[in-house]
Image (cartoon, rainbow, N blue to C red):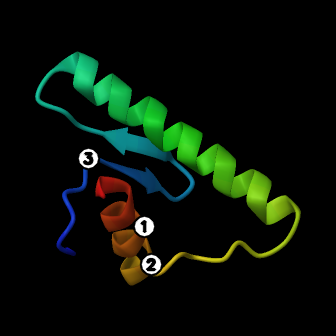
């Protein structure tokens, strides 16, 4: 496992699995996973998506905080 908290995952040839402390939170996690998977699928249809490095994400977040 990595250092990130994981609340949902895709199961090859089976669909997805999402958890939460409440049913509403588990449902929200499932919807979020479906949205992310859909965006990734659309990106793959036009080429190979570039994965943004964690350092670049941290720099962007720091600049947004001011």
3D distance between C-alphas at marks 3 and 1? 24 Å
Q: How far across and how far down the image is residue 62, in percent?
A: 31, 66
Front-most of residues 52 and 24: 52
* Residue hosting label 2: 56
Q: Which residue is mark 3?
A: 7
Residue 5 position (above or below residue 49): above
Q: Earlier in the sequence, mark 2 or mark 3?
A: 3
The furthest residue to the top? 24
Query: Under tag 1, what secondary structure?
Result: helix
Res 58 quadrant in image: bottom left
Residue lying furthest left in this view?
A: 21
The C terminus sits in image quarter: bottom left
Tell me, yes or no, whether the two marked residues, 2 and 1, touch with CB atoms within 8 Å. Answer: yes
Number of on-image labels: 3
Contact between marks 2 and 3 (CB within 8 A): the answer is: no
* Residue at disc 2, secondary structure: helix
Q: Quadrant of residue 56?
A: bottom left
On screen, residue 3 versus residue 51, left or right, reads left
Q: Quadrant of residue 55?
A: bottom left
State the image coordinates of residue 53 (x, y, percent, origin top left).
46, 81
């Amino acid at each position: 496992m990595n250092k990130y908290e994981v609340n949902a995952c895709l199961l090859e040839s089976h669909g997805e699995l999402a958890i939460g402390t409440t049913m509403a939170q588990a449902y929200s996690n499932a919807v979020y996973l479906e949205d992310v998977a859909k965006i990734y699928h659309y990106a793959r249809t036009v080429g190979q998506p570039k994965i943004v490095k964690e350092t670049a994400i941290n720099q962007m977040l720091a600049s947004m905080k001011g």
